[in-house]
Image (spheres, coloured by chain):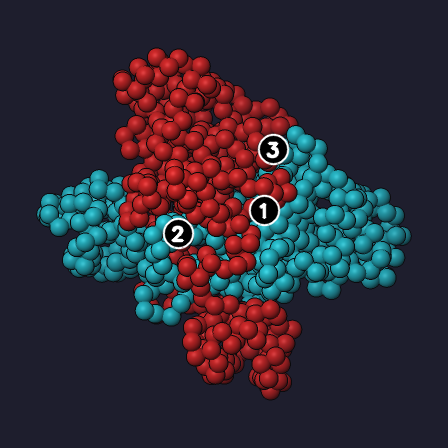
Chain colours: A red, B cyan
Amino acid sequence: MNFPLSGVRILDLTQILAGPYCTLILADLGAEVIKVERTEGGDAARGTPPHYFEGESAYFLAMNRNKKSVTLNLESEKGKEIFYRLVRVADVAVSNLRPGVIEKLKVDYDTLKGINPRIISCVISGYGQTGPCKNYPAFDLIVQARGGIMSYTGEPGRPPVRMGTPMGDLAGGVFAAHGIMAALYQREKTGTGQKIDISLLDCQISLMIYRGQNYLVAGEIAQPVGSGHISVHPHGAFKTKSFDVVIDLNTQKVFEGFCRKIGRDDLCQNPKFTSREKRYENREELYRDFHQIFLQKTGEEWLTLLEEEFPIAPINTVDKALNNPQILIRNMVPEIDYGTRKLKILGNPIKMSGIEKEVFKAPPKLGEHNAEILQDLLNYSPEDVMNFKRDGNI
Amino acid sequence: MNFPLSGVRILDLTQILAGPYCTLILADLGAEVIKVERTEGGDAARGTPPHYFEGESAYFLAMNRNKKSVTLNLESEKGKEIFYRLVRVADVAVSNLRPGVIEKLKVDYDTLKGINPRIISCVISGYGQTGPCKNYPAFDLIVQARGGIMSYTGEPGRPPVRMGTPMGDLAGGVFAAHGIMAALYQREKTGTGQKIDISLLDCQISLMIYRGQNYLVAGEIAQPVGSGHISVHPHGAFKTKSFDVVIDLNTQKVFEGFCRKIGRDDLCQNPKFTSREKRYENREELYRDFHQIFLQKTGEEWLTLLEEEFPIAPINTVDKALNNPQILIRNMVPEIDYGTRKLKILGNPIKMSGIEKEVFKAPPKLGEHNAEILQDLLNYSPEDVMNFKRDGNI
């Protein structure tokens, strides 16, 4: 089967979240991703509580399908030799190490380039490989906070909250995948690899988009908006007779259509609400009216009346989100074989004709592919592999 | 200058946010992005309040640097002819239209492929081009809510809040950019283009990672965590004598080192806190202690003592985030020429050797490149262009 990244071999020295999410994207697109894991315990995500399936953490299972696993002690002479042999036949090496550690382990770009000039090296770290904070430790929450977005997530006047999903880490993973694919494309033209340096903090800055630009243009410091929006009204969550719903009436046309549909022409004819600017000026009254309106029916009734034509939705809990027929029909909750059991996982959001028939292979057990990679790919003998094992190199 | 995507020409029919963020990523990597805009007003982002610079919205300026702009009335015969001539010389066409509209405008993949078999077509929409909800309207908040992440963003027992930055839209943009680059790479091997179908809702499902997997493995329905974490303790925001700080002590080693550094060896020796599991069990007491501790110094004092060694950070407002020396030194707030003035913008988080010398060109005025594209690229005469203008085709 030919997937978009078929034939691309990636050495993945990352663990936990940002790096594995990057290589998950590449693996789903067809790259051969080889996780290079510590001999003791491997990727720390494997041990993350609280939920396990067949002895493996749900946290790990969430983002390691379609990958292979080899164990390697990179601090041993032999372990490094094996790694360098892998570098010789690989296209990409990804790690999430701070500057000093990369050099200490001798897996820096200059070393790898000496072994394979076509290698693309991508390092994902909290602050990047340059600058005064390059050696500071950082994890998801730290960059959500330092990067600015946390300061305007949550309710006005309430304690700060983070984005519920770890966007500090995930953003690093997605931009690293961009860099790697751009380098792969460029290598088709130039024949040489390159070095990519992704900082989780930089990624947060990019994700601020207009809230950041508003400061740069007008000095405005973004404030928390709850479920609201600075320039769209009405926008946000509303209580109904049953569950809460959200609406996002972001154009004049949508606002007017919505009012008419719910039998409240008076609202869009009300001179206080006839333009975006006026709705902003009179937003207190606007929201008072809308809160009243939504209390008159159940969530189900509002959705039945409106969801096909207008931007309205329930605030789905995870179970409801993952049982949505729209999601199931788009194969976003595929079921895979895992040992003798079936395991459901989250799907690949990149739907393209090159992968019309999606394939999801089980996340690997630690070192599951040691023999395959060392013997079949690197031509070590079965005896070599046994000795590596005995000596703690793999 | 050779950037990773130099020589790639992208027709960008998108507006507002998800699509423009996708093509922003590709433009920063060196692609030639041609915004194809409505003759009347163009990209709706150009009119988005409340802040403007030289007559252009900050919202628009935030994500349209490094792009060109042509105006085109795709509903006119001549406008479509011009568009198809562009398709003939382009590599990628991106749009954010619902299924019916694409066919009505005749910019669907099958039509474009008939004109240029190498074309890569990417459509970004709320729910994708298939499934029972494919025609439903959706914007950022709608997919944040329906996709599940909103249900666990915010404080327990408080009203639902959204991620402060529009991750519903932005995620669609980033995964679309992945699909496009994967297709470009594959086309180097196969010579043919393909079709990419990105659903904002699918992207939200992918971003749930372990919170989604916890449900699929154990039926756990994610609950809001404020600034906390389900399996890391202590993790979150703490008041100090001045501003709030966050910490994320996610391993045993980090927890112990932290306690020692602040002169509280007793905490890591306390049998209630000696392992991840015990800290989870006794988290009430743990947080009580940590809240007390942080109140004893100012935020500045805590940061000076800890930030070089431990995951701790201030919750930066946008101004502080954008004036951070680490951010400035990594060129994440570059200054560009805009007319006769200087404009600061948010930088490109993908740092790679192929773009060591970053270039940022001013976001285009509406139709700024009409003559360049129509005359120089498509070989229309200046008279043609004048007539197109007169007839409302451009």
Name the amino acid, label 1. Answer: Lys
Q: Earlier in the sequence, mark 3 or mark 1?
A: 3
Q: Which residue is mark 2?
A: B216
* Image point (19%, 51%), residue name: B279
- Tell me the crowding category of disc 3: few under 14, some 14 to 19, or many 20 or more residues within 10 angstroms, Cα based: few
* Residue A93 higher or lower than A175, as above or below: above
Above or below: residue A135 compared with residue A77: below
Q: Residue at x 58, y 59 (%)?
A: B126
The percent position of residue B202, horizontal first and vertical second, equals: 52, 53
Quadrant in the rendering for residue B215: bottom left
State how far apart marks 3 and 1 are (Cα): 15 Å
Q: Amino acid at mark 3?
A: Asn
What residue did someone put label 3 on?
A: A2
Asked whether residue A142 appears in the rendered view, the answer is yes
Q: Position of residue A207 (x, y in %)?
A: 49, 52
Q: Chain of mark 3?
A: A
Chain letter of the residue carrying label 1: A
SS of the residue under disc 2: helix
Residue at the spot x=81%, y=56% of the render? B79
Mark 1 against mark 2, which lies toward the viewer? 2
* Disc 3 element: loop
Quadrant showing the C terminus of chain A? top left
Residue under label 1, please give it. Answer: A351
